[in-house]
Amino acid sequence: MPSIDARDIRNVALLSHSGAGKTSLTEALLFNNNVITRQGTVEDGNTVSDYEPEEIKRGSSIQTTLIACTDDNKKVNFLDTPGYEDFIGEMVAAVKVVECAAILVTAQSGVDVGTERAWDLCKTHALPTVIVINKMDRENADFTQTVNNIQSSFGTKCVPFQIPVGVEQAFADVISVIAPSSDIPSDLQLEFDLWRDRLIEAIAESDDDLADKYLEGGDLSEEEILSGARSAIHLGNLVPILITSAAKNVGTQELFEFIHEYMPSPIDGIKPDLSDDSGKQIDLSVDSSSPMSAFVFKTTADPFVGKLSVFRVYDGTISSNSEVWNSEKKQTERIGQLYLPRGKSQENVSEVCAGDMGAVGKLSSTVTGDTLCAKDTPVAFGKLRFPVGFYSVAVSPATKADLDKMSTSLSRIVEEDPTLHLSRQPDTGEMVLTGLGEAQIDVTVDKIKRKFGAELLTRLPRVPYRETITRTAQSEYRHKKQSGGHGQYGHVMLRVEPMQRDEGFAFGSEIVGGKVPREYIPSVEKGVVKTMEEGVVAGYPVVDVKAVIYDGSYHDVDSSGMAFEIAGSHALKSGMLDASPILLEPIVKLKINAPEAYTGEVMSDLNVKRGRILGMTPEDKYTVIEAEVPHSEVQRYAQDLRSLTQGRGTYSLEIDHYEPVPQNIEQKVIEDAKRAKEESES
């Protein structure tokens, strides 16, 4: 494929609520551009974009797919992104590397929570945006009502650039309002005139000179209307509304032409931050002859092909069989064959020039968010800021055969999706996988089984409870064992005392007169510490306790460090059981951002979860609620908050401190811990 000038390239992120038809739209666009000979459907699982088995199984996108369409030396790179909230990290990466976005809404439901999320993302990145009303051929499709819904949600700068010919099953064509033809049906003339006047008014409002001419009663020329619209769209002062039926392939080619005509090219669009080795900001020229700089915005892991890195070139040209510099890792990467990915297939290309996108396989250390550049002119793009997830599961191998594969496969899959985080919990020893929600975790486990052959089990992580005491107690343990030859003897008298919360652990000795030789005291402490780590009441670590050896005895022949270690361990267990032991539970600081309309439901739910409201702060149409809640109550809060707020609420949490577990709950925790121990031992 010959290289295309950056002026003739458009990079567009397709965004929407789940199910709005982005994948079906890309099928129609590929068909129109003769890339495929037959349109697939999501229902049949044969689309180019949704090719992963997990996507086919669920009937929705779970990752961003690059769909390149070329027509008459004009190229549009569409990034088909998932619409489901658990995969919002894919959307975040996509909007980083495009100059504009197309937000799809359905003609039946209008603006959904996913539409609002996509809109906010575009405004955050100052992306010129076009709104596409899709599924105009479906029952209950209502163009006027959907336009009103869009304008009430996002403002009157959202204006139709097209009107439909026919409704529902009769939807057959679109009429351009911005560049009309002469043959407008008589029954649509009134509607056309209404939207034409509104569009010209909106264009005039976006430019002072045009506004003066318009207000003075002068008509705007066609050239002024077209150039004024283009300028207003680029500045974000005008948001076109277009119409399609992706399934019937109506309005899709007009969308392609519109994007190329009115949306910004890589040369016209907002440039990302770029700095040199010293941190100095430098300008992008978007020139194929300049020193090369490219940004890796997606990584996919494959056990056979290896990593596939999808990148956007901003300056210069990246060629097959060359070397580049990874400025993040400070090392050279060997570039093999370059590809233009189209779903599960790839088209070999010899080079990718400024403004365009491509992919390369088997880079040794490059991951999502890295910059590739020329070694003699190192540069770096700003880092991607992915959302942080708080939904965690403990993962374990299903069989011993899966154990060896588990760590490697988890590391590879986390490299593929930066919104996933893998950690080992020090208090419980569990391997914990954290993401944005249950769907993302389920998809990840399915991928690991398919790609790496490792079957993993998931469950809620153990809450890191702790044990402590509430009063002082004394205990005594005499370890005495005789089995021929040297025996074992260690005698310890121990006092355990409660300490202030978060003071940790202290060990002391009040031995006088050599009742226990000095060299055995560290062994006693070792036995105490070991038992504190293992727990006494329910197997959780013991904290905020001071242990003091105040008396004991020894045997000249049979005493040893091991004997006193065992004696110290048993003395602590006995002492703690007499010192009114209790369980402590972690309390998290929870910060919730919820729409005003759902504030009451959120607060009621926090009360049910034993939460304490610390404060409420109104912010625009949202309320920020800060609360303290037991960690055990919010392990599935991602799902709970989504249900309470229809997906519009967000939250963050962190463990803040520990408090005693209420007595009515403590016994259940102890029983559950004992049952879990028995199951693991069996």
Image (cartoon, rainbow, N blue to C red):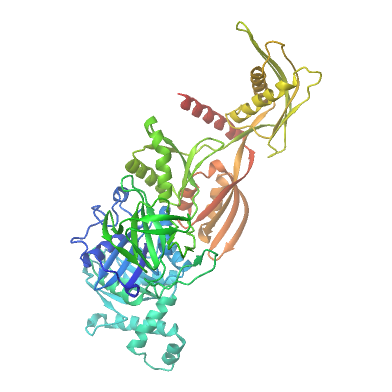
Say which quadrant the C terminus sits in: top left
User: In which image quadrant can residue 498 be found?
Assistant: top right
Q: Where is residue 294 in the image (x, y as percent from the top left)?
A: 41, 63
Q: Position of residue 430 (x, y in %)?
A: 50, 36
Q: Which residue lies furthest to the left in this view?
A: 37
The vertical placement of 218 against 55, above or below, is: below
Q: Which residue is drawn at 55% across and 64% down?
A: 278
Q: Can residue 103 be seen in this view?
A: no
Q: Residue furthest front?
A: 376
Front residue (pair 428, 562): 562
Q: In this view, does 651 lie to the left or right of 362?
A: right
Q: Is residue 394 left or right of residue 197?
A: right
Q: Is residue 466 left or right of residue 183?
A: right
Say which quadrant the N terminus sits in: bottom left
Front residue (pair 609, 425): 425
Q: Can residue 525 be seen in this view?
A: yes
Q: Which residue lies furthest to the top in this view?
A: 484
Q: Where is residue 133 in the image (x, y as percent from the top left)?
A: 33, 68
Q: Which residue is drawn at 23% across and 83% down?
A: 186
Numbered label tally: 0
Front residue (pair 439, 378): 378
User: In which image quadrant can residue 512 be found?
Assistant: top right
Q: Position of residue 646 (x, y in %)?
A: 44, 56
